[in-house]
Image (cartoon, rainbow, N blue to C red):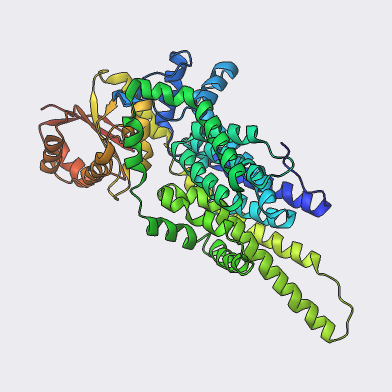
Amino acid sequence: MKIHIPRNHVSTMLFFMIFLLGAVLRFAPGVLAGFPVNDGGMFLIMIRDLRLNEFMLPQTTSYNFSDIPFAYPPFGMYVAGLMSELLNISEIDILRWLPPLVSAAIIPAFYWLARQIFGSSSKALMSIALCALLPGSSDWLVMGGGLTRSFGILFSLFAIGHVLRVFRNDKDKSPHLAILFCSLAVLSHPEVGLQVMGICFILWVFHGKGMQGVKEACLIAGGVLLLTALWWLTVLYHDGVSPFLSAMHAGIHETLIASLFHSIFSMQGGLPILTMLYLIGVFAVLRRREFLLVVWSLVPYLVDPRNAPAITIFPIIMLGSEGARFLYLKFLEAYLKTFQSRGDSVEVPSLLAVGVFSILLGYLFFTAWRQTSSLARISLTQADREAMTWVKENTPAEAQFLLFTNTGGVSPMADAYQEWFPALAERRSQNTLQGLEWVLGSEFFPYSQRLIALQSCETIKCLDDWARQQKIDMHYLAFKKGDASTALMASLRTDGGYRVVYESDTALIFLANR
């Protein structure tokens, strides 16, 4: 399989410039943060669990001492574990650098897919420009947790392209590669695997031809089941279907309309560039009675609204490329008419097009860089890590903690401190949510709301009532200063049932004497 690089000198230059700028944006957050961005603590422990189990899938992960089934698709953890084992690189460094590396590889992979869809290098170049430089487009892929998300997206692009080739009966089609990349997508990320199945169904509807298409679809589906069997059969043997059913409850909470609206009408660096180009592109393709990209941009919201934006960004970007092409042709048409009406000789303003394209690249890069700098700030600080090290070295191994890290109603699944604490402090956090999507089932989101309510407690009575209702013990309370409730910290300082055992400029830890 080749990723075709444009041969035209200007196109080649633009391709490599886009790739370089996109790679800079993807590596910058880890460089600025000095630590994996945002999440990844649970994956750190799962990688270590694999290594300790000699790369055999364990039944549970030791993360947060919660007996969570090791049901997560393991491809990314295997890659990270093997890299750490063979190259003698720390798992934390791998979580810092491997996600942006894979995320950068998505840029040429998307160019290859766009070429399959368009058969045009100019539209494909516009597509990867938006993919590489659109502010926020790679945020979730370059984080520590992007270890699985980035692999899932990368393999999904190759899977979709090869499945499309099979159903279109292209000369260079390869069912074996279609099966391989679909399997790798399934083994990389649970929601991406589910979405790839939905997109493959769309491709079959549009391009599957009679019984031949049915046979090819069955061949691909059977091959994927076979190649992924070692993983899902192991999980079924240990825990049955309950982890998968539980994870499904965690994945369909986001409403379809809200998720769709946010994806299409979100702002990119202050200007809704992609939104405008997408809507124009929808008009352009519908006028030609071409429906695949439009359907592809909508159906994932029916499959899994929460994860759909990460999947639909690619057809939305390709429709945006169609919109840009439409505007350029209309401009060219007006340009030619203007000079022809005056009787002047006319030359196609290709340099003008390249100039406008370069200005767009510059605008997107600098607005994306501003967001990249903000992204680096959601990583753990050195002071955060020092507090967790103190906990590891100065508290009993069986100690149980309540963490107070934000009062702004932030989802516990997006709280870096709460996720990394069990991994770095090696103590149980009673209010860390990560991993519980595999065990809580329909209780996942109600429990998440109760954890948010805990963060808003400002009195000891509120804290005690919450702990009693949840039937949990708390030996220590750890506060992240500046983000946690100052009223609750002040109340605890004056209450004889709690004693300060650690304090720094950024952290405060109480021992509960009750």
Q: Is residue 320 above or below residue 53?
A: below
Quadrant (top left, top right, bottom left, bottom right) of the N terminus: top right
Q: Residue furthest front?
A: 211
Find residue 248 and report its horizontal and vertical position in percent.
Answer: 35, 40
Question: In the rendered image, which quarter is residue 244 located in?
Answer: top left
Q: Nearer the viewer, residue 340 or 174?
A: 174
Residue 124 vs 270, above or below: the answer is: above
x, y (%) of residue 444?
Answer: 27, 40
Tell me which residue sits at (71%, 65%) in the image: 356
Percent x, y of residue 205: 55, 51
395 is higher (above) or lower (below) than 498: above
Instruction: Name the quarter where the C terminus is drawn.
Output: top left
Q: Is residue 325 visible in the rendered structure shown here?
A: yes
Horizontal side, residue 99 vs residue 105: left or right: left
How far across and down, in percent of the image, does residue 336 sit?
A: 80, 77
Residue 321: quadrant of the picture: bottom right
Q: Residue at x 86, y 72 (%)?
A: 347
